[in-house]
Amino acid sequence: MMFFDPRNLRTTPKPESVMLPRMPREAWGTFVRGQLEAKGMSPNQLALALGLRPRHVIDWIDGASGFTVQPATVVHATARALGVPTNDALVAAGYPAR
């Protein structure tokens, strides 16, 4: 299982060199909550897969401010952790499909 290490985000190349604007929080939170429910996962399990603290994942899904990670990195890492296609995650987050 791969873990998402937020400490390496500043030095890790952005997936496919995608630069995205700030994530539309409501659409993304709805998508992630729906995927968690469909897969029978809890936010704690997603946190474990991403290598983050559960509280950070819950705050991030709920749209708390202060989440400063590049949106493309978040979309790609979360799509991998949820086992969904990256394009589906991008569209659900309010971005054009690639």
Image (tube, rainbow, N blue to C red):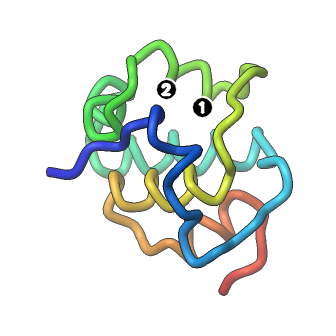
Dot 2 falls on a residue whose secondary structure is helix
Q: Quadrant of residue 67?
A: top right
Q: How many marks?
A: 2
Q: Position of residue 27 (x, y in %)?
A: 73, 49
Left or right of residue 80, residue 88 in this image: right
Question: Of 58 and 70, which appears nearest the observer?
Answer: 70
| Disc sitting over residue 89 in the figure | none
Residue occupying the far top of the picture: 55
| Disc 2 target residue | 57
Note whether 4 is above or below 66 in the view shown: below
In space, the residues marked 2 and 1 are separated at their CA atoms by 6 Å
The amino acid pointed to by label 1 is Ile
Q: Quadrant of residue 61?
A: top right
Q: Position of residue 71 (x, y in %)?
A: 68, 51
Q: Are marks 2 and 1 in contact (CB under 8 Å)?
A: yes
The amino acid pointed to by label 2 is Val
Note whether 87 is above or below 70 in the view shown: below
Q: Position of residue 26 (x, y in %)?
A: 76, 40
Question: At 27% across and 40% down in the image, what residue appears?
Answer: 49
| Disc sitting over residue 61 in the figure | 1
Dot 1 falls on a residue whose secondary structure is helix
Question: At 54% across and 69% down in the image, what residue appears?
Answer: 15
